[in-house]
Image (cartoon, rainbow, N blue to C red):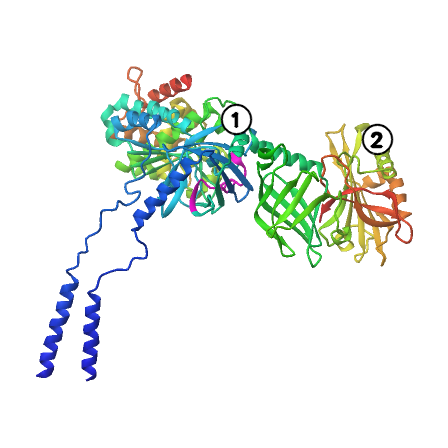
Amino acid sequence: MKTKYFNIFLLTFVLAGFGFSCTDDNSIDDSYPIVGLGGDDYPKNYIDEWLYEQFTVPYNIEVKYRWNPYDYDISLPFVPPYEENVIPVMELIRDVWINTYKDLMGEEFIRKYAPKNYALVGNVKITSSGSRVTGEAEGGNRVTIYRVNWWNPNDHTNADEDKRFENLVPLMLKTVHHEFTHTLNQIVKYPEEFIRITPEYRLDEWATLYYQGDDAVRDAGFISAYASCNPAEDFAEIVSLILVKGQTWFDTRVAMANSTVKLPGSEYTAQEALRLKETIVVSYLKNSWGIDLYGTDEQPGLEKLVQQAMKNYLDTH
Amino acid sequence: MKKIFLMLALMLGVLASCDKKMDAVFDEPADVRLQEAIDHYRNTLTSAPNGWIFTMNTKLGGVYRFWLSFTEDGRVIMLSDANSEYASTIKESSYRITALQTVLLTFDTGNYLTQLHDPEAAVSGGTEGQGMGADIDFYFISEDNGVFNMLGRFNSNAATLKPATPAEARVIVNGAFYDAQTLLTEYSMSMIYSVVSIEGVDIHVTFAPRQTAVEYLDDNGNLVNAVYNSYVDVDGLANGESNGTVYISTPFTVKGKEIIKFEWDSGENNYVAVSADGSTYKLIDNRKPTYSITSVFGVDKTFNALQTVKSQLEGSITEPFLSRFNEIGDLLKQSTYKSYGPELVYMNMRLVLGSSLSSIPGIGSSWTVLEITFRTRLTGYYNYEYSPKFYWKVNIDSKGIYTFTDRINGTTSIEAEVGSAFVKMFAFLENNYFVLDWVSNRTAGSTAMLGGFYASDANGEKSDDFTCGILMRN
């Protein structure tokens, strides 16, 4: 009996202890603001104002050009862009990407589908395997454009041909259109039959193929070395190369491809494969998005709008 | 009873657990202290009247220096010692002082400093994918008499941020970063073989604008080669028109003396090494190494060949060897290939083991062999080059006296066709005793180490007739 009372006393004591322990005021002290919460504050300059007017107000696109180490792969070195290159590069993106889609599809299309974050990086990204990355699209939300510091309208004789201005402009545009194609694909996937045309994709071997030259990949049914990486890159390469280099260029490439030997694992020759991929790309854009790639003489399609806008940009810079 | 004690202990434990009062280590919460630190660094950086000198190590390119002036609205203007243009043309960009685990100074738009971090080798040098191995954002680590010690976030490079004096700021905006480097380069070009003797160890010192190389024999007689990050200060220009102090970023120690810098001595018109304890050691131009050539030259040593390239030895190569060497060129012009305009490019004298020349009939595998190559160019025939080779057995007596015997021609037809051009050189080698020694470098603009085989008497007494060549590595 004694033991029983003792145990009841003890239990009461412990419960009371817990009760008191719960009565302390444990609310978080919010009288001290957390440093850097919500991002750093910085004084706005003319670039920030221009980007806000040109991209944020009309399309709700944020353009980041100030360096923040944790926005990018922390294992690789990156440098921020030179301020003087930010507006010219974004003018190109506005004129030859946004405005061409806007002219064809209306402003609402860009508002709805354009990635909401654009990030600019000064250098070309060099991965640990040595491959060079010029742009990346992440989850339909953010597009990163690398090599902004290559921008130099006066550079027409650079030994590195990719850095000559007349070559760099279409290369950078190709990156922009390539990444936007990924964004569209992330919303509506391309048809499964596209994957089966040339089923033997090369994954990481594409970098090796890059150095073997265009003929090697063309006769394997790919429009570029990078296209041989996987179906998603293949699709984006066809769209972006047709837009930036033009339909005539594409037709010439197809005509040069092998038309006699069937590709391994495929029922098509390289020439047939490239033409079939083009057909699927055209119908995907039309049926899934209402985008007319080639258009007509009276009603120019996206390809002609891009070609004309790019020419205008080069003529005025 | 035991149970009751246990229960009492438990009760005490429960009571104690109710006490939630904490003894904070710091008076203020972390966010308050972080904000105070950010404000302190920002206020300090923006209030320096003459700007700052930022000194940054890189992994591959040595030390780079910048003059920085920060404004409260997040702007920074800078000059850099990267090249003459960057040393004289102001570049403006933005910067941020931000909290990233700890307080970080970051240059968040492109400028001279961020350019060094570009991973493309074509931009600022270094290796493809890593570039120079620089940094663009830096943690504040400590503060020492107004100087901030900093650490690069990506490559962990050490850096310092020091307030500039009015005199430093004045000369830097007039291009002193580059001028100081130019003065150092001119000094280095004027010195053929700089030697500083530290506690009995003779050290060969070679200055470059971002790195300093030292070379000496260690206690075991091994040749030590090391390159240290360093920079030349603008103090000489700020105080008058003289060379600047050369600071070693990672001081090196010889015989217990930690060498931290080299100061300019206007009276001696030369540098003086200064150790951490204040000892000083004068540099002299010795024109040749102070240690014995035999400690570094031989079949199994650091160097094993002497290469005679006339254009690189003007002033050092002397008569009568010079005439003998020139005559080879003249005789080649009259040889089998005379219609193709043959020219002697160089003569290479190499000591090798006979066992490595098993393809040449007649060479004993246990021999030490002197191999001489006469590199020849046919200027009238696509600059085609060929290399007649000849071999001798090398005999070295206990006094270090060399004789060359048992000549064997190379195995191609070339040796027989043009061999007559070399007969006087052969006679010189086969009819004399020789000792190996340094040759004083008297060639303008050259800092190469020169050596030669000196013709001697039977006792090893040197004459003035010696082969002369640049020491080549094994």
Instruction: State whether the magenta stretch is mostly helix, strand or loop.
Output: loop
Marks 2, 1: nearer the viewer: 1
Residue type pointed to by label 2: Lys
Write down the chain letter for disc 2: B
Q: Is residue B85 left or right of residue A304?
A: right
Q: Is residue B128 magenta?
A: yes
Q: Position of residue A58 (x, y in %)?
A: 25, 26
Same chain, labels 2 and 1: no
Q: Residues within 10 Å of mark 1 (few under 14, many from 20)?
A: few
Q: Which residue is mark 1?
A: A158
Kind of element beneath mark 1: loop
Of residues A168 and B158, the one drawn nearer to the viewer in this rendering: B158
Q: Residue at x 58, y 37 (%)?
A: B235
Q: Residue at x 29, y 27 (%)?
A: A52
Compared with B331, B411 (above or below) is below
Residue B98 appears anywhere in the view: no
| Cα–Cα span, label 2 and label 1 | 43 Å
Q: What stretch of residues is rendered in magenta?
A: B122-140
Q: Which residue is mark 2?
A: B333
Q: Position of residue A66 (x, y in %)?
A: 37, 35
